[in-house]
Amino acid sequence: MDYRKSSQTDGTHETDNGGYVTHHNSRNDAGRDRNWAAITGFICAFGSMIPFIGSVAFVCSIVFSSMGLKSQKRGLAIAGLCISIGLVVIGFLIVLAIFGLLAAGATAAPME
């Protein structure tokens, strides 16, 4: 197979296959290979809200969304990361509030 670069600078090249010229866009092919990771990361971000499996889904969401940042579905990957990180921040604030209320209740004067 004879690969010759074309004069185009957008990442495409032409292949001469016995008189037929086909165009390949290597930049889009690489991004298309990771679309599944962006979609999976986005779905796992919502799965991290489910009790008992949320921690596993959270880790999967971070990993797959990070992989999907180089795909054509980059928006889904960014949304998956934002949802996952946002849920962790909200969960941390809730735990902090619960411990704060417990500490305030433990030091309060007893009622008579």
Image (cartoon, grey):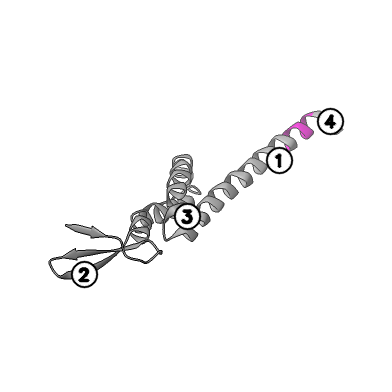
Q: Residues within 10 Å of mark 1 (few under 14, many from 20)?
A: few
Disc 3 crowd, CA 10 A, few/some/many (<14, 14-19, 20+): many
Query: Which circle marks residue 51 in the picture?
Result: none
Q: Which label's residue is closer to the chain start, 1 or 3? A: 3
Eye-nearest disc, 4 or 3: 3
Judging by the rendered image, the residue that carries numbered circle 1 is 97
Q: Which sits in the foreground, 75 or 47?
A: 75
Amino acid carrying label 3: it is Ala
Residue in the foreground of this view, choosing between 7 and 46:
7
Q: Which residue type carries mark 4?
A: Pro
Q: Residues within 10 Å of mark 4 (few under 14, many from 20)?
A: few
The numbered mark, 4 or 3, whose residue comes first in the sequence reads 3
Mark 2 to mark 1 CA distance (whole Å): 65 Å
The residue singled out by tag 2 in the image is 21
Residue 105 pos. (x, y %): 77, 34
Spatial CA distance of label 3 from label 2 is 35 Å
Dominant SS of magenta comes to: helix
Rendered position, 69 above or below 63:
below
Q: Quadrant of the C terminus?
A: top right
Query: Is 70 placed left or right of 83 in the picture?
Result: left
Q: Where is residue 50 shown, x and y percent of the image?
A: 48, 48
Task: In the rendered view, tell whether residue 21 sits above or below residue 93.
Answer: below
Mark 2 Cα-neighbour bin, 10 Å: few <14, some 14–19, many ≥20: few
Number of the front mark, 1 or 3: 3
Residue 26 on the magenta span: no
- Circle 2: element type: strand
Label 3 belongs to which residue? 77
The residue where tag 4 is placed is: 110
Q: Position of residue 111 (x, y in %)?
A: 85, 34
Q: Residue at x 47, y 47 (%)?
A: 66
Q: Name the residue: 37% across, 66% down.
A: 8
